[in-house]
Image: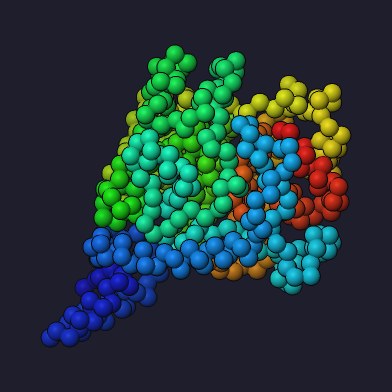
Amino acid sequence: MRLLFHSAWVPRLMRLAALPGAAALVVVAVAQSQQKPSSYAPVTGLDDFKTVVARMEAAKPQIMKTHMDLLAERYDLSDRPAKGVTMSRGKPVQEGVRVKLPPGMTWEKLAAMTPEEIREKDLWPKGFLPLPHPNHAEGGMLFPKHHIDEIKKQEVRDLTRFDLDYDLPAHFLPEYPPPIYLTTRPDLGDVSQGQVVTLMNYYELFDGILNPKQLEGLRLLVTPFPQQQFNQTDDRRSLLPSRGVTCFDCHVNGHTNGATHLVGDIRPQEFRHRLDTPPLRGVNIQRLFGSQRALKSIEDFTEFEQRAAYFDGDPVIATKKGVNILERGSQVHFMAEFQALLDFPPAPKLNIYGRLDEQKATEAELRGQELFFGKAQCAVCHTPPYYTDNLMHNLRAERFYKPQMVNGRMASADGPIKTFPLRGIKDSPPYLHDGRLLTLEDTVEFFNLIQELKLTSQEKQDLVAFLRAL
């Protein structure tokens, strides 16, 4: 006799054990609990939907408090915009290092130490450790409230989860809605007209600008399809049965709104990375897709997302919840063709080679550029004009800290991560593949330690000034 074990079965099994001849059933079930974790999620739940909702709603306040306490321990979350620095449509850029240091430590003292010393003395800033999902054991797509409100207003489609809320404050997220720039029509500037593009307005906004293939591709990108947390089954995480999510619910307007979930390509659960949704801007010049999956084309990425990533990489669950199988020769091709039109925002201080125009740049920006290509060694990976080498690199951040469990996330080796383009970087906070770095200043401090650069305070400021000009 073989029985798959689930912890929720214990009370029921104990009741069964009281029946004649049932004790063996409990023994078998408990024995099965000692097996190694499975790569597969349970296909059916044991509790009815109302019971699950009641249990998760009751647990939500403590889960969110635990996670928000972690953020407060790691970061200065105050709203401190940089003077005179904005994103493309005018949202202020946050300034300053927000990662908190261990007591009695300074960035200069830390940079003077070896990775081994930092590791042994447990001095690696907690904000530089991998960032867990608000409930890492549960995971799943989470959307900022302003996006939930806009989609509910336009489509009467609710992306609210009854078990979790989004965590990062809105002032650390990209501007909303972000502008859309097309490689085919740079003369038009922002073609979004200040709107969040959805199924309700895409035709009105783009008819006459796109060809029919591209227009159909955009339609598919704003069409909701079933996803792990948002579908019609009773193991969803929305109160009402859901039509699902769209590609543009995370990559809003072909950019990003900071929506998060867990990557689907790692097991067990505690080793899965939180994912900070990257922009789709500039995918036409990229050759690797996915932080670590190294998919070789935007077509591969588009098809993979709905076949597997929407369902945590589990085709069994995908079948149950209503996976949308895209047709490669037309639908995937159309979607990819539109995505390849999404351009970076204008950078008026850059010349055609992606370098600063000396007549337009400030002295600080020019000094930062010299550092970028010199002492800071940024250009080893981030080569102009788009500031990516289209490769993957392993930072080996684990040199600086011992493996540790952080709110359900095992902080250990991240492995190789793709080189994301830096063009338009000030428009897409937070940073790194999991969003653990809230500002560009945090990012510079992180790489100063990772690369053992020993930059001065002035050099760090100049480097940030250059990054803001890209």
Residue 217 seen in the current view = no
Residue in the picture at 71% in, 47% down: 95
Along the line of sight, the residue nearer the viewer: 121 or 287: 121
Residue 58 in the image: state x and y as whole percent: 37, 67
Residue projecting furthest to the left: 20
**Residue 298 sits above or below residue 124 on the image:** above
From the viewer's perspective, tell me whether residue 95 is left or right of residue 23. right
Determine which quarter of the picture holds residue 283.
Answer: top right
From the viewer's perspective, tell me whether residue 50 is left or right of residue 303. left
Residue in the picture at 52% in, 50% down: 275
Residue 225 in the image: state x and y as whole percent: 33, 39
Residue 462 in the image: state x and y as whole percent: 82, 42
Along the line of sight, the residue nearer the viewer: 367 or 63: 63
Determine which quarter of the picture holds residue 44.
Answer: bottom left
User: How was this image coloured?
Assistant: rainbow
**Residue 311 sits above or below residue 409 on the image:** above
Q: Quadrant of the image for the N terminus?
A: bottom left
From the viewer's perspective, tell me whether residue 276 is left or right of residue 468. left
Q: Quadrant of the image for the C terminus?
A: top right
From the viewer's perspective, tell me whether residue 64 is left or right of residue 183. left
Residue 6 seen in the current view = yes
Residue 336 in the image: state x and y as whole percent: 46, 28
Residue in the picture at 81% in, 29% down: 361
Determine which quarter of the picture holds residue 423.
Answer: top right
Residue in the picture at 79% in, 67% down: 105
How many tags in the picture?
A: 0
